[in-house]
Every structure is written in structure tokens, then in C-alpha cells.
Image (cartoon, rainbow, N blue to C red):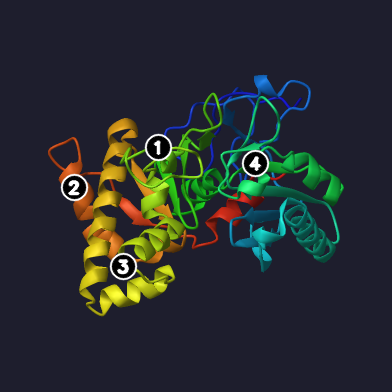
Amino acid sequence: MRAYSRPSVFIRGISRPRPPPPGERTEVKGPAHIDCSIPRDNPVHAVKMATVTVKEPSMHRIGIDFGGTKIEGIVLDAQGREQTRKRIPTEQAQGYESIVTRIGALCQELAAQVGGPHTIGVGIPGAISLKTGCVKGSNTVCTIGRPLQQDLERAIGKPIGIMNDANCFAMAEAILGAGRGKQLVFGVIMGTGCGGGIVFDGKVLNGLQSIAGEWGHMSINPAGPLCYCKSRGCVETYISGGGLQQRYAEQVGTQLTFMDIVARYRAGDPATAAFMQQFFEHFGRAVANLIAVLDPDIIVLGGGVSNFDELYTSGVAEVAKRIFSDSLETPIVKHQIGDSAGVIGAALIGV
């Protein structure tokens, strides 16, 4: 079982650090190492915080971001500079074993390019159950109940770090991106699904059941669409890219991609304009609820839907209408690292 020493460390760019023990080196150049593997001997007692380990990076880092439609891999050198990057389709319809094989093959391809010592971290939709060691809460439903970490380690031939993809995104943006210098950062992924991650004082908050930040499965309409999680009206069913496409097909009668929906909206199509107004209202309600509970210093948006510019005007206006305060002070901003912040965060959590 890996030891997690103390609850916080000093990393350049993270505010309000707690002082380190005397004599400990506390400044990190390049990406810090984060130990987030699940202890095999007694996973129920795994820690609730993924804590940054204070040490100089000395090897390359491979990060894998596994999502519903694509698997992306990246190699960072010891100074955190990107060396190579590759995307392949997930091919979810081919099933769980195919996904394990594809991720394993991509890791081996990147490792061959490194040609030396390296760490591997994988960001996944969902989380690893502390009770069973298997995946739970994933919108890539073929992975639910499967021992993904163990199967990937067998396919790759070495231990890996594994963490929820939204947590990886939030960590990368908190340390290197739009949330740098903020104490409490909430990172949102609005892609195929809708996830979230919380970073406080430079560490990811996982929570007792590894579901902290899972705002995509808060219901904003108990009579709404059925979600794969068995609840109705989840945030994800309304404002994720996949949810938007499904709702648009139901309401407008045409099956379009999210970008095609955006194009129709910007072209002034009345039916699409009415649909998008509902989207802004759902976004406003969901984010206002989030702020009422967490009141973060900043909310950073990622995923394909976050590239929709009107989200930061019309969408934020709907948040302001619903905020439980006399004004909306919370910055709601676009990612700085890019759509691939998740894969960089995955590289940061490698072991």
C-alpha cells in the first residue's frame, strides 16, 4: 500500500499552501507526481484525497485519456514538455476486451517511443470502486463492473495510476491552466458525458465514495429523460454533447452532431434557437446549484461543448439569474490548456 504523507504540498502556482515539515524540499519544477493507485490489499481504506508527492520528476510520463468516442495518448518529458501525442477511436461497440486491447497497444506504442523509464497514468469516465476495485459510474457502460485497472496493468505489463477523467482535467487546469493560483477549482467536462472534478489547495478531492464532483448526475428534472445511471433528468442528459444531440433529435426531429446544431443556431433557425435557449437554461440551473453547494473560486469548462462561445455569454447569464446571491462573482471560464487537458492530467497522475 502506498503511503500518502500529508494533506498538502507547495507547488508553484497554487495559493495558500500549508507549510511543509522542516528540511523537506518543496518546490517542484515540471509536473508533480500524484499517487492515485488503488491499494490492492484493502481498497476500502484507500485515502480520499489524491495528494501531490514532492519530488523532482526524473522520467518521461505517458498519459492516456479514455473517453466514449476517443482514446488519446501523450508523452511528456521530465520537464513536462510534450513529446508526442496520438488519438485513436474508442470503438466502444466492439466491447470491453477491445477497449483494453486498444489502450494497452497505445501505451506500448508510446512506451517504445520513450525507450526508457516512464510512468503511465490513465483517466477514465467513471471511477474505481473502493469496495470492489472495479469501474463504476461510467458512461462507457461496457466497463462497469470490470477490473479495468488490473486488466490494463496485465496488458501493459506494469503498474499504472488511474483516476476519473474529470479529476485529471481539473488537476491539469488547476496546476497549469485557467485555475492556476486559485485555492478551490471546479473543473467541468462537457463532452460525450458530463463530469466534474474538485481541486483544493493543489490536490484532487475524491470523497468517501470517489464521487466528489459528479455533478453530471444531479437531477434537475425528476420527470426528465432516463439516464444510464437509472435516474431521470440528470444534468448529463441535458447539457453534455451526447445529451444535447439526443434531446435535439427528440424535440426537433433531426439527428445532428453538436457542431451542426450550433451551425443551425447561428444561422438563425427558429426551432434550433428555441432548443438552445432551453440548453442555456439547463446549464444555468445546473451551475447555479453547483455554486450554491461548493462556491468555488473558479469554474473551468472543458470538453467539446466548452468550445461553444455563446456558453460564456448566454449560458453564464442564465447562471446569474439563478445564483443564490445578489451577484454572480464566480468566474466561469474556458480551459487554457486545450481540449486535451485531461490527457495531460492523466500523465501527471502516472505511477
Amino acid found under the numbered disc labelled 1: Leu
In this view, the residue in front, 227 or 46, is 227
Q: Position of residue 5 (x, y in %)?
A: 65, 24
Q: Which mark is residue 237?
A: none
Is the N terminus in the top left, top right, bottom left or bottom right quadrant? top right
The residue identified by callout 4 is 144
Q: Which comes sooner in the sequence, label 3 or label 4?
A: 4
Is residue 347 rendered to the left or right of residue 284? right
Could you tell me how far apart the alpha carbons at marks 3 and 1 are, in whole angstroms?
39 Å
- Measured along the vertical axis of the image, is residue 19 above or below residue 35? above
Per the model, the C-alpha gap separating discs 2 and 1 is: 20 Å
- The residue singled out by tag 2 in the image is 320
Instruction: List x then y, in percent, for residue 112.
Output: 84, 63
Classify mark 1: residues with Cα within 10 Å, few (<14), some (14-19) or many (20+).
many
**Toward which corner of the image does residue 75 lie, by quadrant?**
bottom right
Question: Which label was assigned to residue 184?
Answer: 1
- What amino acid is found at the position of numbered circle 3 in the picture? Val
Taking the image as shown, residue 38 lies to the left or right of residue 52, namely right
Q: How many marks?
A: 4
Residue name at image x 24 percent, y 52 percent: 281
Q: Secondary structure at mark 4?
A: loop
Alpha carbons under labels 4 and 2: distance apart: 37 Å
SS of the residue at dot 3? helix
Considering only order in the chain, which callout, 1 or 3, is on the residue closer to the N terminus?
1
- List the residue tagged with mark 3: 252
Image depth: mark 1 or mark 4 in front: 4
Q: Are marks 2 and 1 in contact (CB under 8 Å)?
A: no
Name the residue furthest left. Answer: 326
Nearest to the eye among marks 3 and 1: give it. Answer: 3
